[in-house]
Amino acid sequence: PEPASIRAADGFTLKGFLWRRSGPALPDTSVVIINAANSVRCRYYSRFASFLFRNGFDVITYDYRGIGESRPATLKGFDAGWIDWGGLDFDAVIRFAADSFPDRPIDVAAHSVGGFLIGFAESNRLIRRVFTMGAQYAYWPDYAPRERAGMFAKWHVVMPLATRLFGYFPGKKFGWLEDTPRGVVKDWAYSRPRFEDVPGSSWAARYPDKRAILDLFAALTAPVLAVSVTDDEFGTIPAIERLLGYYTGSRRTHIRISPASIGAPSIGHFPFFNSKFEEKLWHIPLKWLRSGTVDPDWPGEIITPERRG
């Protein structure tokens, strides 16, 4: 990949990487934007990006402001929230893709909160297809029951307290994730059943009318394939369905996979994008991004309205 610099509408420069083919585009391929999980560096998805590139796609990975390649000299006083990551950063990457690859479809592969951020981008109408893995916005009662108490203490007590002390969350010191801007911590730690109802949220100042936020999400018309796995403590059925409920303008399909169905001891929230699952799982997003369909022999089950309850 080659380094990429992408300028957001407010002047902030994002850094990332670009896998670009030198010859003509292959049939049924697009430029794929990879949206990372909360406070995870884009480098984590390099093997998956290379896999897509080997299969004919051009790929863009990038770090949200405050993370990895896009981190400023200091995070103290740097107050970026999810609205900035989606409404400014991701929106800028969509526009960059449209300018850099004219006449090419734009698809998105999103992990965790990366699937949530899609809804904040005014340019999301340009997206052709969306694949998500474990996409949700961390409303704590949706966490897996066995892990819920510990996760609440970790993400909704310790994280915001540490953020107050340092002015940002020093995730590296804790060995949990990348250092994280305080606005993102606030959006995560004080989540509500409806994300637009979070008091003092980062999007309230920009969109005082909640209807405007909902309209942004509804503007996405790209079909969504949402994958979740049974041993993901974040990506439970209620969590995935809570987010999918906002994309009312899209055809949404939710498939749920167990580790046993692919002969693996575990999958979890992060390892889907580890290259050890290239043969067993990556054919699912590959097929979806190429054709908008899923192989008939895919592992797992489709979550029906009866299961969603």
Image: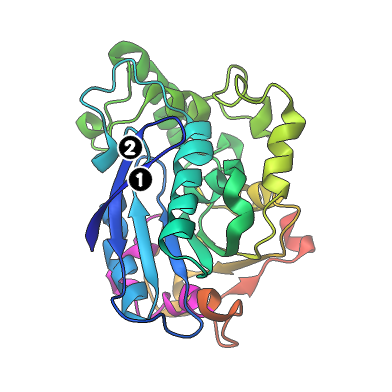
Q: Label 1, on which residue?
A: 6
Q: Which residues are magenta?
A: 270-287
Say if residue 233 shows up in the picture. no
Q: Main secondary structure of the magenta part?
A: helix
Vertical comparison of 81 with 137: above or below: above
Amino acid bearing label 1: Ile
Relative image position of residue 267 (x, y in whole percent)? 40, 64
Relative image position of residue 103 (x, y in whole percent)? 52, 69
Q: Is residue 272 a member of the stretch shown in magenta?
A: yes
Mark 1 or 2 closer to N-term? Answer: 1
Callout 2 secondary element: strand
Contact (Cβ within 8 Å) of mark 1 with mark 2: yes
Vertical comparison of 195 with 299: above or below: above
Q: Residue at x 62, y 18 (%)?
A: 199
Q: Nearer the viewer, residue 4 or 294?
A: 4
Q: Residue at x 44, y 70 (%)?
A: 259
- How far apart are the alpha carbons under marks 1 and 2? 6 Å
Q: Nearer the viewer, residue 179 or 222?
A: 222
Q: Residue at x 48, y 23 (%)?
A: 186
Q: Residues within 10 Å of mark 1 (few under 14, many from 20)?
A: some
Q: Residue at x 72, y 39 (%)?
A: 214
Lateral position of residue 205 relative to residue 16, left or right = right
Q: Which mark is residue 153?
A: none
Vertical comparison of 151 with 37: above or below: above
Q: How many numbered circles are shown? A: 2
Q: Label 2, on which residue?
A: 13
Q: Nearer the viewer, residue 30 or 167?
A: 30
Callout 1 secondary element: strand
